[in-house]
Image: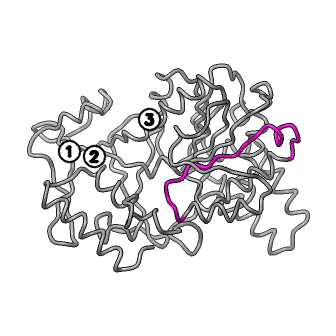
Amino acid sequence: MQDAGEAKSLAQHLARRIRAFGPITVEAFMADVLTHSQHGYYMARQPFGRGGDFITAPEVSQMFGELIGVWMADAWQRMGRPSAVRIVEMGPGRGVLMCDLLRAAGSVPELRAAANVHLVEISPALQQVQRQALAQSGWEAQWHSTLANVPDGPLLLVANELFDALPIRQFVRTRAGWCERLVDATSDETFRLVLTPGPSPAAAMLPARVRETAPLESVAEVCPAGIALAAELAARVKRDGGAALVIDYGTTEFGARDTLQAVARHQSHPVLDAPGTADLCAHVDFAMIGQAARESGARLWGPTTQGAFLERLGIQVRAEALARRATPAQKADIESALRRLTGAEGMGSLFQVLVIASPALTELAGFL
């Protein structure tokens, strides 16, 4: 989390911007709160893990990352074993997932020789943490601020809990039409949600079935950055070969919903309060990003639930293997992690898995 001084500075920056130019979109508010170059939530902080604001699947257990590595090794073989392949993670957090997947993927000597590692990360603070983690892995890695900077060539990419942090726009259906939600400042440090005075042309981004059928007062969301990234990933794998594995919490059908939320210290937090002290995120609309990827020429696999995906990859077998060498306390931890990653009451059903793949890939593990 940010300290109080930095949070106050971010709030004042936002208030000055609003006073100068008028209320801003939810998208603009999210972007500044999360990625402002000086005060953004992700730019100078480490929000991951038990001591942070939230825990991601790689932090729950090494099994998650290891099975992603197994999936990549299998996909590489199905690609025809290219002699050079990029292993890429977007939004790598503390580097835990990349370290775990490389340990598993590196057990295939031919893949170890063919692979080079790339991490896409905009936060200087997190880049440093990732460098320290990867330094112990035995792999060399390169860092980039955008996917476009990753060198051309076949790639195997993972994005775990990335799309949920991409800024969204929100619209409300009124009697006048679809108005956009905006953020207004009520003081130097406090904010409120308002609506555009009339219907917003930007609502054309919403799926037609949502625009036409949602009841009055419905809230609908669209993530332009997520749609653009899905299209970019699709174009990349179509051109160069490979697959992008997207794992996140979200929905699989078009619909109107209000999912914007803030999380601090593993607890819900008011979205507009003390910007920069809490993570901002929204449920991923897998229908929208899937449509964007398909329209850009990719083959889609899924979405399927994280629980089903990991079970098909053999997480139960891996858990049993770890338990055989574990103390009773460690066995209990393994069983707890397995339930959290795959169970219906945990990440197993809330999280979805989608693969954006080259049309040449006609089979992929985890979906067979």
| Above or below, 138 relative to 38 | above
Query: In the rendered structure, which amino acid carries the disc numbered 2?
Result: Gln
| Magenta span | 107-125
Question: Mark 2 to mark 3: distance in Å?
Answer: 17 Å
* Residue 287 vs residue 168, the one in the foreground: 168
Q: Mark 1 points at which residue?
A: 180
Query: Upstream in the sequence, badge 2 or badge 3?
Result: 2
**Which of the 4 image quarters holds residue 212?**
top left
Query: In the rendered structure, which amino acid carries the disc numbered 1?
Result: Glu
Q: Name the residue under label 3.
A: 253
As drawn, is 323 to the left or to the right of 97? right
Q: Nearer the viewer, mark 1 or mark 3?
A: 1
- Looking at the image, do the residues carrying marks 1 and 2 touch, with CB atoms under 8 Å apart? yes
As drawn, is 87 to the left or to the right of 198? right
As drawn, is 80 to the left or to the right of 244? right
Question: What residue is rendered at 75% in x and 47% in y?
Answer: 67
Question: What residue is rendered at 42% in x and 33% in y?
Answer: 288
Q: Is mark 2 on a helix, strand or loop?
A: strand
* Residue 362 vs residue 234, the one in the foreground: 234
| Above or below, 24 relative to 46 | above
The N terminus: image quadrant: bottom left
Q: Nearer the viewer, mark 2 or mark 3?
A: 2
| Above or below, 137 relative to 226 | below
Question: Mark 1 to mark 2: distance in Å?
Answer: 6 Å
Query: Upstream in the sequence, badge 1 or badge 3?
Result: 1
* Residue 146 vs residue 167, the one in the foreground: 146
Question: Mark 1 to mark 3: distance in Å?
Answer: 22 Å
Residue 205 x, y percent position in the rendering? 29, 32
Q: What element carries label 3?
A: loop
For the view shown, which residue lies furthest in the right direction? 325
